[in-house]
Amino acid sequence: MDNNRYATPAEARAAIEQLSEEDHAKLMMMAGFWLKRHEARLGRVLEPRDLLGEAFELTLNGERQWRKTVSFLRHMDQAMRSIAWAHAQRAKTAREGARELKGIGSRQDRPPPVSNVEAAALARDELAALEALFADDSVALEVLRCRAEGKEGEEVRSELRLSKTEYATVCRRIVRKLAKYALNN
């Protein structure tokens, strides 16, 4: 990748500082447009200023790189479009996962264990089923192991050396796989 094609964080900061009131108004209008476009899937109200702020933040920290061949306003428009879409996808996945996972963990179809021996056997069976389900995804299995040990997200990320994005991606894979498993079993 040619580093001269992309603006540095300092160049992005300078572009933000040079925005006129009219540019800010245009950006707010663009943010409102993208939020309105994804409103049905968002399921919650996200303010245009929040979307614009997130786009500024991601541009400044380098997660959204500004190609110098594109105007800064166009870059921000596309960044907000992408961020709004990502928020809508996460909201949709969360709603679908919650709907599909309502029955997971309930033991209505099984009688309660009659002894600790039977409870241990059921736990071993469930562990074996999880290990088989995630045999091809060692990172997801490690996340589940950490969560079973009572560790929270930040602790899990630190132990497994995952970025926030990687951790969120793994968690979504886990939810989808568990939901699919619950529907088929």
Image (cartoon, rainbow, N blue to C red):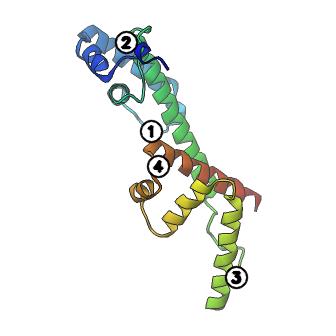
111 up-or-down from 83: above or below = below
Query: Looking at the image, which residue sits at the far right?
Result: 184
Residue at 36% from the left image edge and 17% from the top image edge: 7
Q: Amino acid at mark 2?
A: Phe
Question: In the rendered structure, which disc, 1 or 3, sits on the residue that comes first in sequence?
Answer: 1
Q: Tell me if residue 182 can be seen.
A: no
Task: Report the residue marked by disc 3.
Answer: 111
> Is 120 or 181 nearer to us in this picture?
120
For label 1, the crowd category at 10 Å Cα-Cα, with few meaning under 14, some 14 to 19 and many 20 or more, is few
Q: Amino acid at mark 3?
A: Pro
Question: In the rendered structure, which disc, 3 or 2, sits on the residue that comes first in sequence?
Answer: 2
Which numbered disc, 2 or 4, marks the residue closer to the eye?
4
How many numbered marks does the figure carry?
Answer: 4
For label 3, the crowd category at 10 Å Cα-Cα, with few meaning under 14, some 14 to 19 and many 20 or more, is few
Residue 44 tag number:
1
Which numbered disc, 3 or 4, marks the residue closer to the eye?
4
- Give the SS element for disc 2: helix
Q: Position of residue 15 (x, y in %)?
A: 29, 14
Marks 3 and 2 sit apart, C-alpha to C-alpha, by 63 Å
Task: Report the residue marked by disc 4.
Answer: 162
- Give the SS element for disc 3: loop
Q: Position of residue 178 (x, y in %)?
A: 65, 57
